[in-house]
Structures are given as structure tokens and as C-alpha cells.
Amino acid sequence: MYACSQANRLAVAALCVALAGCASVTPVSYSAIASSSYLAPNPTDASGHIPYRYATIVDWRAYNKFVIEPVVIYRGSDQQFGDMSEQDKASLAAYMQAQFANKLSGRLTLVNQRAPNTLRVRLTLTGATTSTPVIGTLSRFDMAGAVYNGVQTVRDGEGAMTGSVVYAVEIFDATTSRLLSAFVSKQYPSPYDIGATVGSLTAAEAGIDKGADALVAQLR
């Protein structure tokens, strides 16, 4: 019985590993985003977290305030939500709004009106995948899943059966509306962030947290 149970567990883990690649989303430059024509492949990003980018020379220290627009749920034909429900999309958009505003407030002062020395931040949620509860967690402890997730941890890759989030960021000078920076980002938790495997949206939310931290670091 033990041998049978062990074989079943390994089979499940192997299936998780096989399906992980199928569920993975490869971001695009999203044709319906306003800054799409500015975005270009980012050759400096080996991680794949920011595959498309537009950048200008900016002294970010000259800005001490920010306005954040309501997060937009992308409706273009190249959206990457799969069969995600509208309720889940709205939940992720609300979470993104709160987390980015909160994290950016550690570097800049949140204001409601455009003014000098102010950035205007526009976030567009363009895609997401959900985690598979229970199986995703178990795959961290089975032999095959442990090997796969261990390799992915070293590579800063996605874990088996773990969700992710894809979004676009556009940053403008609030007074001139000049586009200062734009990029597409894909974020997901570390494969061994067990807490991010518990619920269907927890991995995407963890990715949003990482993305907000990365944006704050960019603006320092």
C-alpha cells in the first residue's frame, strides 16, 4: 500500500510539473495600451519579469508626489486572463490598486491633483493565472515537485501549479503628461512561498506585492 501511495504521489507531482509549462503565460506588448507603440523588447531583462520596456532619462529624485489612476482591467483581444471570472479580475484589480498606492506612499506623497514634481501612475491589469489549491501545495513536498521547484527557485522561475500576474505600468509627468517610463511586467511568488499556494489568487497577489516593491526600487 505504501509503495502504491508513494507512486501515486509522484505521479501527481510529475503531472503538476508537466502542466506548469502549459499554464504559464508569456506577456506581449498589448496592442490596446496607450504606450504600446513605445514598448520594445527589453534585452537587459534575463529574468523575464519585464520583457517589454520604454525608458527615458529621468531624475526620479525630482519627484516627491504621485497620483495613481484607478487600475484598468485590460479588454484587448490579446488579454491573457484565460477563463478567469470577472469577479476574480475585479478582486485582483482592487488588490493592485491598494498595494501599489500603499508601497509608493513609502517613497512619495499620494495626492489627488496634478501638480509640479508629481508623477501620474497608470496601471493596467492585462492577465493572470490562478494557483491550483492543495495540488500546488503538495507539489512542494513530493520528490518530483521538489526537484522541479528547487530548480525554478534557483532560476527565479515559476513554481508548479502556481499562479502569476501580468500588468502594464505607465508613468507620466503629471503637469506635462510626458511619458517617462512604461513597461510590461510578469510577477509570481517564489516556488517555496507556501502561503502563496493556498488560495487560487494568493500567488497572483504575491506577484502584485513583488511588482509594487520593484516599482518603488526603480523610483529611488
Image (tube, rainbow, N blue to C red):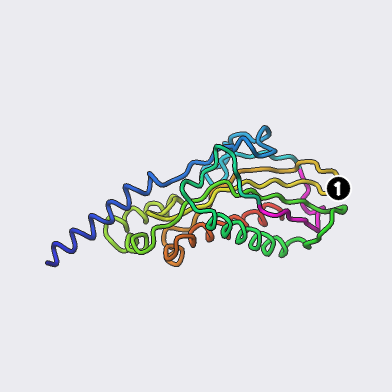
Specify whether 15 is left or right of 116.
Answer: left
Q: Is residue 69 magenta?
A: yes
Q: Is residue 44 found left or right of 100 in the rendered image? A: left
- Quadrant showing the C terminus: bottom right
Pick whichever, 154 or 98, lies toward us: 98
Where disc 1 sits, the SS reads loop
The stretch in magenta equals 58-71
Residue that carries the numbered disc 1 in the rendered image: 175
Outermost residue, top side: 37
> In the depicted view, which residue is nearer to us: 75 or 41?
75
**Number of callouts in the render?**
1
| Image height of 50 relative to 65, above or below | above
**Residue at screen point 51% across, 47% down:** 81
Q: Measured from the top left, where is residue 210 in percent x and y?
A: 57, 58
Give left or right: position of 100 versus 22: right
Q: In the shown orientation, is residue 189 left or right of residue 4?
A: right
Picture quadrant of residue 184: top right
Q: Residues within 10 Å of mark 1 (few under 14, many from 20)?
A: some
Residue 185 on the magenta span: no
Q: Is residue 75 above or below residue 10?
A: above
State the residue at coordinates (58%, 35%). 41
Residue at 71% across, 65% down? 106
Q: Amino acid at mark 1?
A: Thr
Q: Please tell me whether residue 119 is drawn above or below residue 183 in the rendered image.
A: below
41 versus 22 height, above or below: above
Q: Position of residue 141 (x, y in %)?
A: 31, 64
